[in-house]
Amino acid sequence: MKIAIAGAGAMGSRIGLMLHQAGNEVVLIDRWPDHIKAIRENGLIGEFEDHKVTAHLPIYSPEEIVDGHANVDLIVALTKSMQLEAMFQDIQPIIGEKTFVFCLLNGLGHEETLAKFVPKENIIFGTTTWTAGLAGPGHAKLIGSGSIEMENLAPQGKAFTLEVLEVFQQAGLNPIYSSNVRYSIWKKACINGTLNGLCTILDCNIADFGSLSIARNLIESIVGEFAAVAEAEGIELNQSQVIQAIEATYDVNTQGLHFPSMYQDLIRNHRKTEIDYINGAVWQKGKNYQINTPYCAFLTQLIHGKEELLKAK
Ligand code: NAD
């Protein structure tokens, strides 16, 4: 399959590399000049737990995507949420009539953004438990294993989605065809909507947050807001199941000692966060449904305040 990875940061590098290793024709598209330069000069380095690989994959900036690159069968969207719209504006020349887009970003509201560029019948949504990090430009750290849930947005997209599932299966990405991917997306957003922002503002890891006397109350309040807005969108979030999933991460033997990705982006690397697509999306959607979401509103503004203080880019 001819596949473009739109947003070849940590996760885009992982998925792109694994699809390439399985024999697909993979093109990377990214905006970070140092990353493009490093991959062009030295290839993309993928550092797995027990081995290192170097893949000489073509990489372009979105501005370099012109008609000459021909249409691709599939575009895997893996920008950060706030970069998605600009990316798809720029890569329109590779979106043909038959091109499918598979959105694997975290967060809410991407359906509306992608629908501006691609018909709903050609959109696949997913969530993943794979993780990845960047040690530097052109160098991805690919620890651990994971799986990917996927489902077509419109019934007409099912046949091609099953082809994509097969391709991801061959690449060892452990895909699962989901019967309700929107539920999984909301559930993941809700988990991220608690631990990401709270650990970032409180400057602590997940276990330290979990040990606080206020942890349960904060979690219940935020999950309650997500559930109320999700219900208005036709999704019945099981609040106790979500709270259980959040509290399971406090264990120091699993994820407890981990600092959430928002913490790493903002506090360690002074990079802007995806808060507007997590708690911020619930706040904005809540306004439309006249549902009050004071915890999400407050947390969104605190994170933006921290971004300003740290001059995040
Ligand atoms: P990322 O920050 O690694 O990459 C996103 C973009 O930022 C890329 O274009 C990348 O080149 C650029 N970038 C990265 N580091 C940079 C730097 N230091 N300076 C300038 N530009 C830089 O993002 P990601 O972690 O790959 O996440 C992409 C999407 O996948 C997000 O929606 C995220 O929430 C989701 N996701 C990530 C993980 C993970 O483990 N990383 C897991 C599941 C889902």
Image: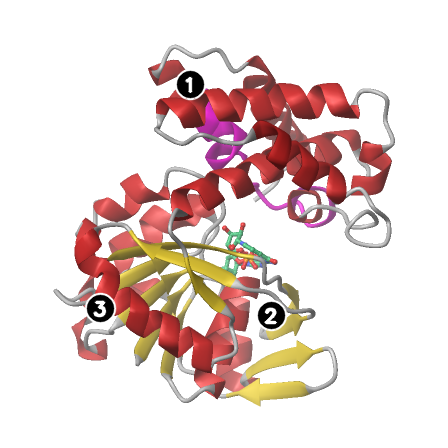
Q: Nearer the viewer, mark 2 or mark 3?
A: 3
Q: Quadrant of ligand 1?
A: bottom right
Q: Residue at x 87, y 32 (%)?
A: 211
In this rendering, position of residue 301 left or right of residue 161:
right
Q: Nearer the viewer, residue 58 or 309?
A: 58
In this rendering, position of residue 71 left or right of residue 244:
left
Q: Which mark is residue 94?
A: 3
**In this figure, which residue is indicated by the disc labeled 1?**
286
In this rendering, position of residue 177 left or right of residue 155:
right
Q: Residue at x 70, y 43 (%)?
A: 263
Which secondary structure class fits the magenta region best? helix
Distance from Cα at disc 3 to Cα at disc 1: 36 Å
**In this figure, which residue is indicated by the disc labeled 2?**
137
Pointer 2 local density, CA inside 10 Å: few below 14, some 14–19, many at least 20: some
Distance from Cα at disc 2 to Cα at disc 1: 39 Å
Amino acid type, residue under disc 2 in the picture: Pro
Amino acid type, residue under disc 3 in the picture: Ile
The quarter holding residue 42 reads bottom right
Where's the C terminus, which quadrant?
top right
Amino acid type, residue under disc 1 in the picture: Gly
Answer whether residue 276 is magenta in the image: yes
Q: Earlier in the sequence, mark 2 or mark 1?
A: 2
User: Which span of residues is magenta-colored?
Assistant: 265-284
Measured as percent of width and height from the top left, residue 66 is found at 21, 70
The quarter holding residue 44 reads bottom right
Q: Nearer the viewer, mark 2 or mark 1?
A: 1
Is disc 1's CB within 8 Å of ligand 1?
A: no
Pointer 1 local density, CA inside 10 Å: few below 14, some 14–19, many at least 20: many
